[in-house]
Amino acid sequence: MTPEELASKLTPAAFQALLEPFMQRATLLALRESQPETPVDTGTLRRSETTRVEAGGLRGFVGTNVEYAPFVHKRVPFFARGIEAATPAIEVEAQKIGAAFFAQVAK
């Protein structure tokens, strides 16, 4: 492969196609780790936890729409703990996306 051919494959669009699925996976990993950390009284807070990824996959969110969630999180930082616990698995997923990108470029 010539340098020109390689340069033509190293485009933002090529990486972008892999980014959104990665962010979906990363937010789900964080959610998986945060839910067991969530205090339970009635279960509403835990059941309300969800993820969202912005178009393009540059930002992902783990959250809830329950009004009292910020007060519970201040006492027991379940989302922060979940993200911290998921970080090693997210790093593995980041390595996979990098490998997939370079495998795609090498074709």
Image (cartoon, rainbow, N blue to C red):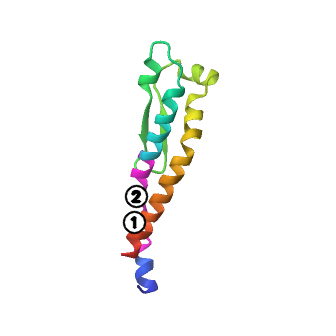
**Circle 2 Cα neighbour tier, 10 Å, few/some/many (<14 / 14–19 / ≥20):** some
Q: Residue at x 59, y 19 (%)?
A: 71
Residue at the image position 47 percent from the left and 53 percent from the top:
93
Q: Which residue is mark 1?
A: 14
Q: Amino acid at mark 1?
A: Ala
Residue 48 inside the magenta-drawn segment = no
Residue 18 covered by magenta stretch: yes
Tell me the quarter of the picture where residue 39 sits: top right
Q: Quick check: 32 left or right of 37?
A: left
Of the numbered discs in the image, which one, if any, rests on residue 69? none
Query: Where residue 7 sits: x, y (%)?
Result: 45, 78
- In this rendering, the answer to whether 94 lies above or below 67 is below
Residue with the most extreme left position: 107
Residue under the point 47% across and 21% down: 45
Q: Which residue is mark 2?
A: 18
The residue positioned 55% from the left and 35% from the top of the image is: 82
Which secondary structure, mark 1?
helix
| Mark 1 burial class by Cα count in 10 Å: few <14, some 14-19, many 20+ | some
Q: Position of residue 29 (x, y in %)?
A: 47, 41
Q: Amino acid at mark 2?
A: Leu
Marks 2 and 1 close (CB-CB < 8 Å): yes
Residue placed furthest toward the bottom: 2
Name the one closer to the observer, 50 or 34: 34
Q: Position of residue 101 (x, y in %)?
A: 43, 65
Q: Is residue 13 above or below residue 73?
A: below
Distance of mark 2 from mark 1, alpha carbons? 7 Å
Asked if residue 27 can be seen in this view, the reply is: yes
Range of residues picked out in magenta = 9-24
Dominant secondary structure, magenta: helix
As helix, strand or loop, the secondary structure at mark 2 comes to: helix
